Image (tube, grey):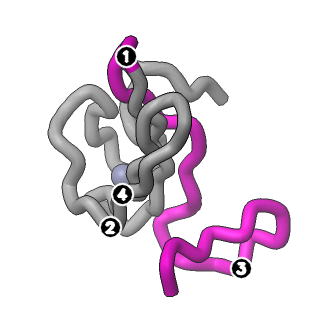
Amino acid sequence: MTSTTGTVCPHCGWPDGAEPYQVVSRHGTAAGSTVWTRCACGSLQVRSVDARGMRVVSRSRPSATPAGRAANSPCR
Ligand SMILES: [Zn+2]
């Protein structure tokens, strides 16, 4: 599974390079910022934004299942 710009959501086909369906939260980091977005299918995505642009670094499954590994809990 790749997580680079130019790919699409494996669940609904939403292009990663397009405008995020919904921005959940935005956090500033030393390298730039991290943006949590929700896809049209409900998948939560973590996007890293730096000087090179925005890329999806992690995404959850469409339904908010307790993944166990990555604790996806942005600001709530
Ligand atoms: Zn999707």
- The answer for how far apart the CA atoms under marks 4 and 2 are is 7 Å
Residue at position x 59%, y 44% in the image? 58
Instruction: Please name which of the two marks, 4 or 2, marks the residue nearer to the observer.
Output: 4
Q: Amino acid at mark 2?
A: Val
Secondary structure of the residue carrying tag 2 is strand
Q: Amino acid at mark 3?
A: Pro
Q: Earlier in the sequence, mark 4 or mark 1?
A: 4
Q: Secondary structure at mark 3?
A: loop
Location of residue 28 with respect to 25 vertically, above or below: above
Q: Which residue is mark 2?
A: 24
Closer to the chain start, of discs 1 and 2, is 2
Q: Where does the image place residue 10, in percent across and percent down from the top left?
A: 47, 41
Mark 3 vs mark 2, CA separation in Å: 18 Å
Seen from this angle, which residue lies furthest front?
Answer: 30
Q: Secondary structure at mark 4?
A: strand
Q: Give the image quarter of residue 49.
A: top left
Q: Which residue is mark 4?
A: 26
Q: Which residue is mark 1?
A: 51
Q: Residue at coordinates 52% horizontally, 72% vertically from top-left?
A: 74
**Is the distance from the Cβ of mark 2 to the nearest ligand 1 atom less than 8 Å?**
no
Mark 3 or mark 2, earlier in chain: 2
Q: Which residues are magenta?
A: 51-76
Between 29 and 38, the one lying in front of the other is 29
Q: Is 70 left or right of 72, judged from the image as shown?
A: right
Q: Is residue 51 left or right of residue 76?
A: left
Q: Nearer the viewer, mark 1 or mark 2?
A: 1
Residue at mark 3 to residue at mark 4: CA–CA distance: 22 Å
Query: What residue is pinned by disc 3?
Result: 66
Q: Nearer the viewer, residue 72 or 39?
A: 72
